[in-house]
Image: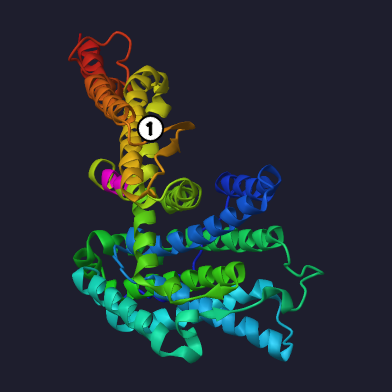
């Protein structure tokens, strides 16, 4: 039997071609605070970076190993709580531990917990694994209330990152300093997870996901492959938990509960589980919806849920899958064929969605607004929500936009098929393949 644990240590070579995207992304992350310099924007970017690490760690289970987990937030929360206790020990006993090393301890603790849980949960990747993960999530959520010494009960565990040993004179008093710390761990963790996906162990995780019986026939232990992926995922989830403790300086039971586990599942599906960069897109979109859209409306969860349902039904590959669908058109140089059909279809669809959102906002305001508060503002327009005209306008925009989008959808589908169809070679007749014509020419 092949030794998968030894294969996991063999990293692929790094060339200039595959290193260029990482260098460009790192440079972009370094200059991003100079573009969005407000503290609120940096706070959102910090949360976004932590979510990306957690989403990539979760994708090691779902996307690469085919293991659907309903309680993966327990490894993030466990690593975060351990880092919070270490942070308090550093303050109380003046331990010489720099703050940038703290996420590593969170990863080690997450790895330890995943080692224990994975020993009995990775025997299969189907319903049994999903139910065990759900049970572990419920168990740890209950323990967060019962074991007050470690989890702090309902109040949680607070901490102060500024009392640690300064790191080259940096005391992490400002959000920009925390941002660069998180970005360092983001790039390092993402690179290590990417390299793991290129190792024999990562490749075999894909094989076990697709056909575990065949992998067993070839001499590989499907359980051992899943166990390695599970432990690696727990390690990086713990790193995300340590960064969350540093960023928030307080953790509660909600940071390891089922709500966060459900969110990371939604994020991964939105981005695309079949692609490495899919969870990155999902984390960015979800964080923006939760923060920016959450400040504008109380119905943001309704819109996120509708987006998730639409993605699962019509775009199973997520946002990354939609982007990669255009790769054949780009290689053939036919993307320009899609511009006009996309405009004719997507613009009316956008207005239909905005009209439906306006209708829901008006209904919500009419139902929950205080007595006498009839004016509301949406889409930079103030009007009386109890009037019939605004409701009629939103319904009309929704119906007309949907009708126009549905009417132009066949043209968009035809343009799509034309964009991915290679051009016929010059001189080839209709229904005649180039090889056939060459064969006929050679025999004449």
Q: Residue at x 38, y 73 (%)?
A: 257
Looking at the picture, how far across and down is residue 229, in whole percent? 39, 70
Q: How many marks?
A: 1
Report the front residue among 21 and 187.
187
| Vertical arrangement, residue 88 with respect to residue 408, above or below | below
Report the front residue among 240 and 405.
405
Our reading of the magenta stretch's main secondary structure is helix
Reading the image, the residue beneath label 1 is 326
Q: Which residues are magenta?
A: 306-311
* Camera sees residue 107: no
Q: Which quadrant would the C terminus be assigned to in this image?
A: top left
Q: Residue at x 69, y 89 (%)?
A: 92
Q: Residue at x 52, y 68 (%)?
A: 240
Quick check: 345 left or right of 96? left
Under tag 1, what secondary structure? loop
Looking at the picture, how far across and down is residue 329, in whole percent? 37, 27
Quick check: 112 left or right of 400? right
**434 within the magenta span:** no
| Vertical arrangement, residue 354 with respect to residue 102, above or below | above
Q: Which quadrant would the N terminus be assigned to in this image?
A: bottom left
Please identify the quarter of the rendering in which residue 399 is found.
top left
Pick out the residue farthest to the front: 372
Q: Residue at x 20, y 11 (%)?
A: 430
Looking at the picture, how far across and down is residue 302, in whole percent? 32, 49
Quick check: 31 left or right of 188? right
For mark 1, does the 10 Å Cα neighbourhood hold few (<14), some (14 to 19), or many (20 or more) residues? some
């Amino acid at each position: 039997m092949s030794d998968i644990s030894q294969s996991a240590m063999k990293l692929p070579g790094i060339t200039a071609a595959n290193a260029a995207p990482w260098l460009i992304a790192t440079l972009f992350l370094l200059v991003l605070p100079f573009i969005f310099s407000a503290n609120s924007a940096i706070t959102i970017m910090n949360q976004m970076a932590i979510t990306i690490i957690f989403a990539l760690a979760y994708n090691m289970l779902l996307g690469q190993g085919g293991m659907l987990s309903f309680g993966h937030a327990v490894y993030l929360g466990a690593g975060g709580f351990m880092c919070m206790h270490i942070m308090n020990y550093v303050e109380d006993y003046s331990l010489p531990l720099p703050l940038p090393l703290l996420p590593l301890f969170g990863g080690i603790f997450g790895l330890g917990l995943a080692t224990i849980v994975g020993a009995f949960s990775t025997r299969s990747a189907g319903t049994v694994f999903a139910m065990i993960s759900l049970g572990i999530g419920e168990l740890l959520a209950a323990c967060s209330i019962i074991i007050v010494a470690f989890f702090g009960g309902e109040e949680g565990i607070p901490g102060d990152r500024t009392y640690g040993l300064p790191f080259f004179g940096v005391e992490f008093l400002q959000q920009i300093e925390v941002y660069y710390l998180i970005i360092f761990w983001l790039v390092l963790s993402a690179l290590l997870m990417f390299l793991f996906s290129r190792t024999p162990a990562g490749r075999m995780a894909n094989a076990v996901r697709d056909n575990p019986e065949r992998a067993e026939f070839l001499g590989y232990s499907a359980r051992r492959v899943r166990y390695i992926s599970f432990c690696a995922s727990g390690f990086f989830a713990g790193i995300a938990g340590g960064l969350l403790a540093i960023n928030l300086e307080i953790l509660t039971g909600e940071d390891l509960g089922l709500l966060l586990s459900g969110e990371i599942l939604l994020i991964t599906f939105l981005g695309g589980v079949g692609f490495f960069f899919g969870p990155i897109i999902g984390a960015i979109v979800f964080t923006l919806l939760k923060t920016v859209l959450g400040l504008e409306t109380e119905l943001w969860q309704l819109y996120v849920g509708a987006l998730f349902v639409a993605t699962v039904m019509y775009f199973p590959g997520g946002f990354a899958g939609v982007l990669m669908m255009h790769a054949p058109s780009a290689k053939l140089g036919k993307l320009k064929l899609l511009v006009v059909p996309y405009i004719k279809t997507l613009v009316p669809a956008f207005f239909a969605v905005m009209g439906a959102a306006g209708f829901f906002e008006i209904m919500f305001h009419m139902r929950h607004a205080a007595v006498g508060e009839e004016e509301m503002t949406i889409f930079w327009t103030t009007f009386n929500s109890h009037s019939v005209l605004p409701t009629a306008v939103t319904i009309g925009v929704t119906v007309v936009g949907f009708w126009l989008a549905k009417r132009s959808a066949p043209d968009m589908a035809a343009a799509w098929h034309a964009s991915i169809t290679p051009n016929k070679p010059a001189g080839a007749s209709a229904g005649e393949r180039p090889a056939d014509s060459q064969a006929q020419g050679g025999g004449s």
